[in-house]
């Protein structure tokens, strides 16, 4: 019963980490505070101790916030508090859930993927399904949604704004199709590293769901991911010959699938008109962020400086970290994330170059989504604190000796003359 309760608790905590503020019904600082309090309680109920790492991590960003106050003479307590709550919320969940958190993330995204494919498939087969959902289902959930996210949803599925299209886009439960693509990508990574197989049942579902998001950035990230994965995995002449083939295939798909080329052209044209009208393009956001970064490249401009409404900077999460925290905060954030993925790969006996592929892909995904201010992605920086090792530990003298010592009290010798455990120890 205790094991079952712990499993339910772990799934609930991971759902909170995935959902706040990524699922529309969980949008708002009220949910962030609730997630922080809940995770804090269970963290201490399980007699967890605060790691030095989280203290150092927090102090680095407090130091940067302090520099921003001194440099720009601006401070907003709500922004400062919310950022710290995100850090600790992520940390408490990662530590409380522990070594199975990757499996739980994969399972939850797998569940949402299946639901999303069913709903998206039904809308594609019969567009009146979407009309029925908008008329009879989403109005109820609008009433119980604390902050309207400009999206209609029914918790486990979010309707795309441009739903009156020939091919519906799949948002899953998240804020938009591109956001769903990011979490599908994360689940694909965890499932690949743990199982060492690219094409299995869950990964195929993830890939199909990702295809239905129609997210240009997700497609590009997947292409880069696959190309780099082939290079580091096979390391032979055939892998190098395969890359040009993949490039040709990707460019052919890009030119033939109308929405891909049209979307990129639209963003480019909008970026040229950005100085004359309000534009929310990822390219424009990136340019604004880079300009802000260049004005304070070491420690950034911070989060307290208010920008004009037409200068929407949140659409480009990768450059936003660079602008807000400078090269110091940017490197610190992504080095800890890289180290977490490296430790995860080592403990799963996976290629140690793979974290480079992961971070490169996340940079691409973050270029079109404001990802890295969210608790879930902060949590990826703390994964190295989790012991992902299974019972099949690497066989070396120290591990084997520890195993012998741990089992000594459990194994009773058959007689005093022949002790199997002692014989093993003597032969080492």
Image (cartoon, grey):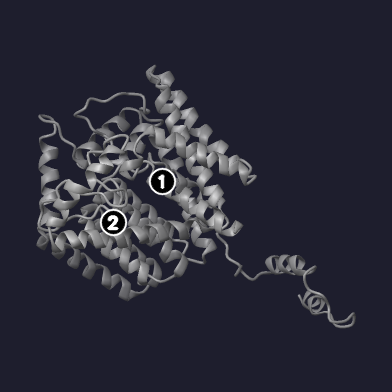
Q: Nearer the viewer, residue 361 or 22?
A: 22
SS class, disc 2: helix
Q: Judge depth for marks 1 and 2 and give the one in front.
A: 1
Residue 32: quarter of image: top left
- Residue located 30% across and 34% down the image: 147
Residue 206, above or below 20: below
Name the residue tied to disc 2.
221
Q: Residues within 10 Å of mark 2 (few under 14, many from 20)?
A: many
Q: Position of residue 5 (x, y in %)?
A: 56, 55
SS class, disc 1: helix
N-term-proximal mark, 1 vs 2: 2
Question: Is residue 426 visible in this depiction of the protein?
Answer: yes
Q: Position of residue 131 (x, y in %)?
A: 14, 51
Residue 257: quarter of image: bottom left
- The image's mark for residue 159 is none
Is 130 situated left or right of 343 in this image? left
Q: Position of residue 206 (x, y in %)?
A: 32, 63
- Residue located 47% across and 33% down the image: 84
Name the residue tied to disc 1.
377
Is 342 situated left or right of 363 in this image? right
Is 355 situated left or right of 315 in this image? right
Q: How far apart are marks 1 and 2 (CA)?
A: 17 Å
Residue 273, above or below 116: above
Q: Where is residue 8 in the image (x, y as percent from the top left)?
A: 50, 54
Which image quadrant: the C terminus? bottom right
Q: Residues within 10 Å of mark 1 (few under 14, many from 20)?
A: some
């Amino acid at each position: 019963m205790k094991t079952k309760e712990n499993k339910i608790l772990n799934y609930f905590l991971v759902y909170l980490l995935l959902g706040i503020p990524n699922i529309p019904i969980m949008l708002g600082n009220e949910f962030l505070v609730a997630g922080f309090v809940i995770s804090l309680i269970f963290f201490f109920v399980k007699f967890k101790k605060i790691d030095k790492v989280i203290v150092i991590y927090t102090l680095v960003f407090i130091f940067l916030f302090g520099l921003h106050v001194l440099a720009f003479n601006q401070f907003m307590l709500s922004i400062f508090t919310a950022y710290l709550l995100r850090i600790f919320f992520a940390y408490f969940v990662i530590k409380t859930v522990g070594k199975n958190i990757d499996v739980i993330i994969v399972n939850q995204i797998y569940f949402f993927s299946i639901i999303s494919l069913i709903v998206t498939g039904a809308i594609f087969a019969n567009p009146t399904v979407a009309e029925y959902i908008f008329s009879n289902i989403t109005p109820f959930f609008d009433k119980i949604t604390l902050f309207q996210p400009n999206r209609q949803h029914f918790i486990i599925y979010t309707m795309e704004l441009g739903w009156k299209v020939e091919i519906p886009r799949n948002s899953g439960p998240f804020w938009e199709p591109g956001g769903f693509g990011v979490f599908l990508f994360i689940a694909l990574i965890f499932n690949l590293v743990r199982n060492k197989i690219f094409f299995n049942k869950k990964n195929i579902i993830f890939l199909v769901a990702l295809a239905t998001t129609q997210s240009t950035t997700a497609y590009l990230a997947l292409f880069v991911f696959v190309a780099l994965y082939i290079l580091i995995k096979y390391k032979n002449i055939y892998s190098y010959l395969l890359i040009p083939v993949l490039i040709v295939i990707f460019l052919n798909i890009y030119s033939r699938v109308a929405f891909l080329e049209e979307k990129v052209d639209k963003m480019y044209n909008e970026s040229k008109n950005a100085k004359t009208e309000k534009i929310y393009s990822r390219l424009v956001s990136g340019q604004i962020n880079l300009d802000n970064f260049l004005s304070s490249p070491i420690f950034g401009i911070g989060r307290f400086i208010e920008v004009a409404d037409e200068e929407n900077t949140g659409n480009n999460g990768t450059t936003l970290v660079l602008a807000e925290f400078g090269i110091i905060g940017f490197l610190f954030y992504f080095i800890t994330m890289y180290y977490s993925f490296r430790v995860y790969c080592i403990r799963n006996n996976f290629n140690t170059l793979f974290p480079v592929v992961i971070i490169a892909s996340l940079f691409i995904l973050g270029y079109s989504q404001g990802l890295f201010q969210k608790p879930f992605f902060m949590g990826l920086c703390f994964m190295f604190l989790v012991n992902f090792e299974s019972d099949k530990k690497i066989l070396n003298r120290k591990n084997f000796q520890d195993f012998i010592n741990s089992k000594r009290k459990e194994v009773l010798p058959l007689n005093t003359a022949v002790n199997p455990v002692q014989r093993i120890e003597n032969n080492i």
